[in-house]
Every structure is written in structure tokens, then in C-alpha cells.
Image (tube, rainbow, N blue to C red):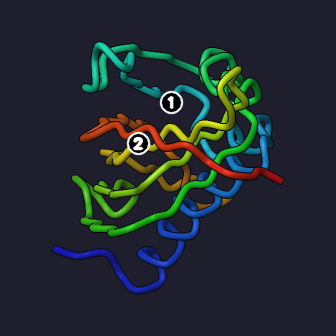
């Protein structure tokens, strides 16, 4: 069974708000997109590209996401989104493909660390709308590129 059009749009908006919030370095705003008892599972690149490090609860998720503030700039582009209804109408699942650029200043110049990734998500509907209940980030490939200029 598929999600209703309204629910699909709401979940998609949640996914895009996450990406924009990370790019804006709005860690507190991004944390609010997660349910109180949510889990964020991250890889440990470059050695481990599968989702292996679990962060449970908003405080732990805030700590994990704070790492983005140490990067010069990021840009997340959502590629494909596939959503399905869960075990009841207040649960949904998603698989989201994305590309994430992480620009940093290095002694040799500006470097763009590119992650080709996917999010495997569980969403929960609460009174205020949809929230992320669990997000597992898997990196499919890593690429490093030189960059000429960075704003």
C-alpha cells in the first residue's frame, strides 16, 4: 500500500528540510525533525561506509550532527525518494538517495569531499506532523575533488 498524496508530500518535505537544515548548519532545527526517542545511525568513513554508529535520542543526535559545523560548507542534493506505508497509517518508511558535498580548506587548497549516499528512514506521525523515527545513512561511494573557490 502507498502513502496518500498528502502524507507523501509531508514526508518528502521533512526529508528536504533535513537537507536544507544541515546545509544551513541549523543543528537545533534539524534535531527538531527527529522524534524524541529517534535513532540516527551513521557510517564511519572512510573505513566503514555502512551505517554502524548509533545515536539515540535528540541529545545524542545533536552531538553527532554538530560535526557538520567543522566543515567549510555543505550542499545536499536529494536524488530519488521512495516511500511506503508502514504497519499502520502513522508509520512510514523511505529510501532516499542523495549527494552530499563537504567543502573544506586544506593546506593544498579547497577540497570537495563528495558522498553518494542513501538514507533508509522510518517516519512517525505525531500531533504536529511527521518526524524521523530512525535514519540510517549508508555511503555508496566517496570522491574527492579539488575546488577553485568557495563562498
77 in relation to 108, above or below: below
Q: Residue 79 in the image: x percent, y percent?
A: 38, 68
Q: Which residue is mark 2?
A: 115
Quarter assignment of residue 65 = top right
Within 10 Å of disc 1 (Cα), the crowding (few <14, some 14-19, many 20+) is many
Q: Position of residue 31 (x, y in %)?
A: 68, 36
Q: Depth check: give the residue in front, 104 or 40.
A: 104
Between circles 2 and 1, the one closer to the viewer is 2
Discs 2, 1 touching: Cβ within 8 Å? no
The residue depicted at 48 percent of the width and 83 percent of the height is 6
Q: Which mark is residue 38?
A: 1
The residue positioned 42% from the left and 50% from the top of the image is: 123
Q: 10 Å neighbourhood of mark 2: few (<14), some, or many (≥20)?
A: many
Residue 60 is marked as none
Cα distance between the residues tagged 2 and 1: 24 Å
Question: Which one is in front, 130 or 29?
Answer: 29
Residue 43 screen position, x and y as percent: 36, 22
Displayed quadrant of residue 22: top right
Which residue sits at x=50%, y=37%? 113
Residue situated furthest bottom in the rendering = 5
Amino acid at each position: 500500500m502507498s502513502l496518500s498524496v498528502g502524507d507523501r508530500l509531508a514526508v518528502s518535505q521533512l526529508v528536504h528540510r533535513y537537507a536544507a537544515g544541515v546545509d544551513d548548519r541549523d543543528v537545533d532545527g534539524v534535531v527538531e525533525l527527529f522524534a524524541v526517542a529517534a535513532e540516527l545511525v551513521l557510517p564511519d568513513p572512510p573505513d566503514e561506509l555502512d551505517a554502524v554508529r548509533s545515536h539515540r535520542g535528540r541529545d545524542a543526535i545533536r552531538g553527532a550532527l554538530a560535526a557538520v559545523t567543522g566543515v567549510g560548507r555543505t550542499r545536499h542534493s536529494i536524488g530519488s525518494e521512495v516511500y511506503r506505508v508502514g504497519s499502520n497509517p502513522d508509520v512510514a518508511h523511505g529510501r532516499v538517495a542523495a549527494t552530499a558535498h563537504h567543502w573544506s580548506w586544506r593546506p593544498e587548497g579547497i577540497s570537495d569531499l563528495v558522498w553518494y549516499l542513501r538514507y533508509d528512514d522510518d517516519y512517525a506521525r505525531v500531533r504536529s506532523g511527521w518526524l524521523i523515527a530512525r535514519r540510517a545513512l549508508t555511503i555508496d561511494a566517496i570522491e574527492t575533488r579539488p575546488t577553485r573557490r568557495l563562498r
